[in-house]
Amino acid sequence: MTKITKPSRRGVLKGAATLAAGSTMGMPALAQSTVEVPFFFPVAVGGPITKLVDGFATDFQKDNPGITLKPIYAGSYQDTIVKALTAHKAGTPPPLSVLLSTDMFTLIDEDAVVPFDGFIKTDDDKVWLKSFFPGFMANSQTDGQTWGIPFQRSTIVQYHNKDLFREAGLDPEKAPATWAELTDAALKLTKRDGSSTTQWGIQIPSSGFPYWLFQGLSTQAGAMLANADGTKTAYDAPGVIEALQYWIDLAQKHKVHAPGIVEWGTTPKDFFEKKCAIMWTTTGNLTNVRTNAKFPFGVSMLPAGKRRGSPTGGGNFYIAAKAKPAEQEAAFKFVKWVTTAERAAQWSAETGYVAVRGDAYETPALKKYTDDFSAAMVARDQLPFAVAELSTHENQRVTKALNDGLQAALTGAKPAAQAMADAQAEANRILKPFQKG
């Protein structure tokens, strides 16, 4: 890949890499004194995930008495990146954070993180770094270096209510596997009472992370939203417009999808209450659905347009550039500890997120879990069709341009082609400083 840095910043990637390498030199033995490692974790409220993370912290400290690990639950991913960058600019960042994989370019541009390569010293370290699914490393590496380690990772999957399929005369064991099948099934699953729709056939959320759900559609249409270097987008490509028009047509033409904006947060609740028969959402909702759905449900890969496809998603571990060397080394030790095959298996089984390494699925715990609950294998099996989640320099602004365009089209404020042309023009303006030639 070509190294791209802001004209106003000097040696971003080189400087960060040097800092990481330097952080491993002259390291005091961790056991000689206590090293405190606060770390940001994106959870808005307490619950099963915080208990699991707290348990990991406690167990790690038992194995490493010279390190005190302090999880800080920082709110949403958006809240967490703001807090992490604010702390970085103040010179007091926590040594470790779980932030979106798509924040990688932003964190590099801000000199906020160091690559993990400087901490990789032994053959065991090298084996560990190669253990992660390649699909998850696509949003973790750039310019030949590894900036994030996959942890809380996901893909989008399709959930369906088997009872409602049966009522509609559909095979409850066969989920729609193509766009045409999805449209046909959704027509049969939509219920109306006069002018009021009581049950939608399909629900694809368009708030919160509209670009992410849309990337499932655009990938299926054979389009890529951005290049791997994060310097260019293709929001106005024919395949992107085709994908957006299909989403619009589900609501406006076929009337099997609620018009306007569909809320991310309430979509699982709508599914539980049988307000929609099929929903697209993160595999991270798997445990939630298993716990709260009072009916048999199916989980499947997203249907194919020209091809199958879903973006990956979720969070990576990042090590702060301004943390002390001993803190960085302790943070690395925890990241390696918590991403063993056994703990990756435990995390997947207890949360529904995808285990980030293949050998986790060979552990007795995850084998038992997936034997009892085969739906947990769908996201893993979809990884060969997955693409990197949309990520660019100035990622939040560039993504907002797409989100704004999507919402303008879905609400009928603009035609699909115009909405995407406007989004592309805004992305071009933002990314121009990062483009050569």
Image: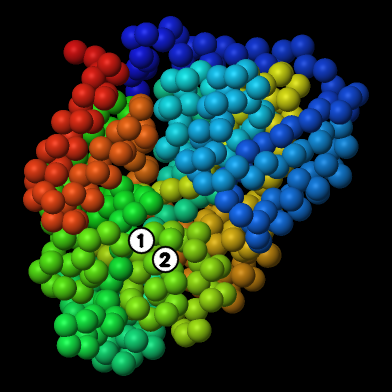
- Above or below, 413 against 259 in this view is above
Q: Residue at x 13, y 67 (%)?
A: 252
Residue 127 seen in the current view: no
Q: Looking at the image, do the residues carrying marks 2 and 1 touch, with CB atoms under 8 Å apart?
A: yes
Q: Residues within 10 Å of mark 1 (few under 14, many from 20)?
A: some
Residue type indicated by callout 1: Glu
Residue type indicated by callout 2: Thr
Instruction: Assign the C terminus to one quadrant of the image.
Output: top left
Q: Residue at x 26, y 25 (%)?
A: 430
- Above or below, 332 against 384 in this view is above
Q: Is residue 328 left or right of residue 60?
A: left
Looking at this view, is 117 or 259 the one in front? 259
| Label 2 residue SS | loop
Q: Residue at x 47, y 41 (%)?
A: 78
Q: Residue 375: x percent and y percent?
A: 48, 71
| Residue 263 tag number | 1
